[in-house]
Image (cartoon, rainbow, N blue to C red):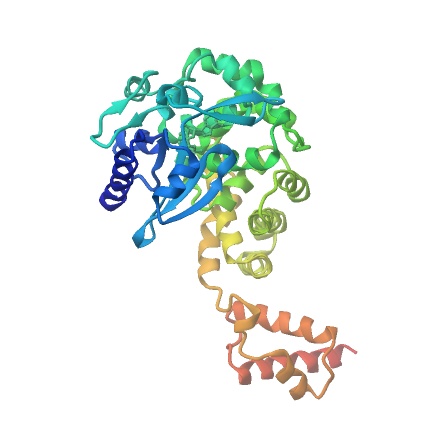
């Protein structure tokens, strides 16, 4: 981090030598005051974009209409340098239509969302803090710059940012700010789902997702999406009233487990969750990984009953089959999620024995899986077809899957010889049945 600050300092010096004002601004100042690692430094300047571009060798006109130029320095570091500006013409409670360049830093800070995000720092590390951000950080309070109602009406996304920053830094939302969220929640319907998703993602995947879900439920914001989730309306209401019902999602290590857990909390099945995630513009990979957890869950749901009725080995086979189908990470994520649910229900006077037994056996079952992918099976389809003297066809895939399961369970070795032998045995018993 030292090098990023010294590089940025050189950049400020260059702008100042050319007669402009320049400051570190926004998140980097906040994180620096908190003693947190700073990964990127935003710079605000009185220089116009074309002046910034003229001063530095390598620049990219990242967002000229917003006054932003990216300056690339040696060593691969880059900084966004944005001309002081005010935003005008907020259209329909979303981002402004146009911006106006100005010469005054304080006015630039005034357009920012929260006091903790509206601080600047000069090259000698003097903090410029016209709205009391430092005090709010110290008191652990999140507060809008200016009149919260106006600020949320200008850009409704700020209500979700409010929840995100409250969770990230453990800040209490100041009363007027929170009341304005409650009042203006319906305006979220004007905000693009992509922006909504980015905030929800950072909230749920951040350090305090439980607080995030609680605040979301209480805010009423989920009811007012531009494209409604289509599920969970009553569940959000229930969570708003019974905040203890929200489990500590921070104990789930993967994003997929956290999202899957949220959808379960909202009583959304795999298909409903998929619809909601499509509306939220989830990336394909993330959607698929969350869906896999839910599908895996649906497949192993009845497993504790199976354990009671038919014993451990039957349970292991079923578990392994599902784990191979939906993948190792889906099974691990589901297990984390189920364990969390069980711990939440632990004040239940009669914890369900068979369920606990399942949860204690499943990690061993997962450990004991020998072959995690069809590709690492010791024989490939073509060799198998050749050995069998048959043309490849649907039978081949089925046969490979059966061999794969047997090898994964450790019932047969994962060598070509062992797999072929198992295959011949399978064929003979099929013939006998005919
Ligand atoms: P992060 O560490 O998440 O990047 P950040 O504070 O840098 O936090 P950004 O979303 O990158 O947040 O925005 C940079 C700065 O721009 C903020 O600190 C804030 O001053 C301002 N800002 C960003 N979005 C808005 C908005 N919707 N309304 C008002 N100000 C905003
Ligand atoms: Mg940032």
Can residue 7 be seen? yes
Q: Is residue 346 visible?
A: no
What residue occupies the far left of the structure in this picture?
124
Q: Quadrant of the N terminus?
A: top left
Where is the C terminus found, in terms of image quarters?
Answer: bottom right
Expressed as whole percent of the image width and height from the top left, the position of residue 265 reads: 57, 34
Q: Nearer the viewer, residue 200 or 80?
A: 80
**274 to the left or right of 153:** right
Q: Nearer the viewer, residue 235 or 308?
A: 235
Which residue ends up furthest to the right in the rendered image? 434
Q: Nearer the viewer, residue 98 or 341?
A: 98
Please name whichever residue, 73 or 412, is drawn nearer the observer in this view of the structure: 73
Ligand 1 shown in quarter: top left
| Residue 302 x/y as whole percent | 62, 48
Q: Position of residue 318 (x, y in %)?
A: 59, 58
Q: Residue at x 22, y 29 (%)?
A: 125
Task: Write the residue at 20% across / 30% down.
Answer: 124
């Amino acid at each position: 981090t030292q090098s990023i600050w010294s590089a940025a300092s050189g950049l400020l010096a260059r702008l100042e030598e050319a007669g402009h004002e320049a400051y570190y601004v926004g998140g980097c100042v906040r994180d620096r005051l908190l003693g947190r690692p700073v990964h990127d430094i935003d710079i605000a300047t009185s220089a116009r974009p074309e002046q910034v571009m003229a001063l530095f060798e390598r620049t990219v006109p990242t967002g000229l209409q917003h006054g932003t130029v990216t300056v690339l320095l040696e060593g691969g570091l880059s900084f966004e340098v944005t001309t002081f500006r005010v935003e005008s013409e907020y259209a329909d409670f979303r981002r402004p239509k146009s911006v106006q360049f100005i010469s005054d830093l304080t006015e630039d800070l005034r357009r920012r969302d929260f006091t903790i995000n509206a601080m600047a720092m000069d090259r000698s590390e003097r903090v410029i803090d016209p709205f009391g951000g430092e005090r709010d950080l110290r008191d652990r309070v999140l507060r809008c710059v200016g009149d919260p109602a106006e600020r949320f009406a200008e850009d409704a996304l700020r209500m979700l940012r409010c929840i995100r920053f409250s969770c990230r830094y453990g800040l209490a939302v100041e009363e007027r700010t929170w009341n304005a969220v409650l009042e203006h929640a319906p305006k979220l319907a004007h905000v693009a789902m992509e922006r909504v998703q980015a905030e929800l993602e950072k909230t749920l995947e951040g350090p305090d997702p439980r607080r995030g879900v609680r605040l979301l439920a209480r805010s009423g914001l989920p009811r007012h999406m531009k494209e409604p989730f289509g599920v969970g309306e009553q569940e959000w209401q229930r969570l708003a009233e019974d905040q203890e019902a929200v489990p500590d999602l921070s104990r789930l290590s993967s994003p997929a487990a956290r999202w899957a857990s949220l959808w379960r909390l909202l009583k959304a099945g795999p298909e409903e969750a998929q619809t909601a995630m499509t509306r939220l513009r989830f990336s394909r990979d993330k959607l698929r990984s969350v869906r896999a957890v839910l599908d895996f869950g649906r497949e192993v749901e009845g497993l504790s009953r199976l354990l009671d009725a038919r014993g451990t080995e039957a349970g292991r086979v079923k578990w392994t089959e599902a784990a191979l189908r939906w993948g190792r990470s889906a099974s691990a994520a589901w297990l984390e999620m189920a364990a969390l649910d069980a711990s939440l229900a632990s004040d239940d006077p009669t914890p369900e024995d068979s369920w606990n037994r399942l949860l204690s056996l499943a990690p061993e079952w997962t450990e004991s899986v020998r072959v995690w992918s069809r590709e690492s099976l010791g024989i490939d389809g073509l060799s198998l077809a050749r050995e069998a003297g048959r043309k490849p066809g649907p039978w081949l895939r089925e046969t490979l899957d059966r061999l794969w399961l047997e090898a994964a369970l450790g019932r047969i070795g994962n060598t070509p010889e062992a797999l072929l032998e198992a295959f011949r045995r399978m064929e003979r018993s099929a013939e006998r049945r005919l």
